[in-house]
Amino acid sequence: MDVFPDFDGLSGISELREVAGALLMFVLVVAVLMLIVSAICWAIGAANGNYQVATKGRIGVFVALGGAILAGAGVAWLNWLITIGRQL
C-alpha cells in the first residue's frame, strides 16, 4: 500500500512553508535578543547586589533558551511527522 500526503495538491503549500520559515526565524531572532538583554540584566544585577534584577535576568535567560529549544524541536518534530506520513 503506497499512501502518502500529496503536498503538491494544495496550491499554497510553498507559501505556507515560506511563512513557517519566516516565523521560525522571527522566533529565533527574538530569543537571541532576549537572551542578550537578560544576560546583561543578570550580570548588572549580580554585580551591584540587586538580587531582584539578577533573578529576573536569570529567568529571562532560561525562558529565552527554552523558547529557542522549543522552536528548534518543533521543526524537528514536524519533519519527523512528514517522514512518518510518507511511510504510511
Image: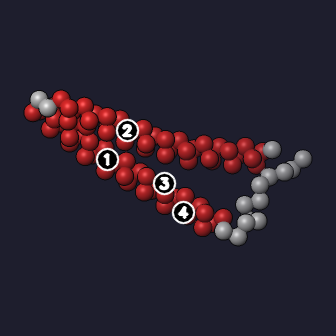
Q: Any mark on residue 34, and which?
A: 1
Up the image or down, 5 lies above or below 64; here it is below
Closer to the chain start, of discs 2 and 1, is: 1
Q: Secondary structure at mark 1?
A: helix
Query: How far apart, in angstroms, are the residues tagged by discs 3 and 2?
Result: 16 Å
Read off the residue under disc 2.
63
Closer to the chain start, of discs 4 and 3, is: 4
| Left or right of 37 in this view: 83 | right
The answer to whether the residue labelled 4 contacts the one labelled 3, judged by CB atoms less than 8 Å apart, is: no
The answer to whether the residue labelled 4 contacts the one labelled 1, judged by CB atoms less than 8 Å apart, is: no
**Front residue of 84 and 35:** 35
Amino acid type, label 2: Val
The answer to whether the residue labelled 3 contacts the one labelled 2, judged by CB atoms less than 8 Å apart, is: no
Query: How far apart, in angstroms, are the residues tagged by discs 4 and 3?
Result: 9 Å
Read off the residue under disc 3.
24
Up the image or down, 68 lies above or below 20; here it is above
The answer to whether the residue labelled 2 contacts the one labelled 1, judged by CB atoms less than 8 Å apart, is: yes
Q: Residues within 10 Å of mark 3 (few under 14, many from 20)?
A: some
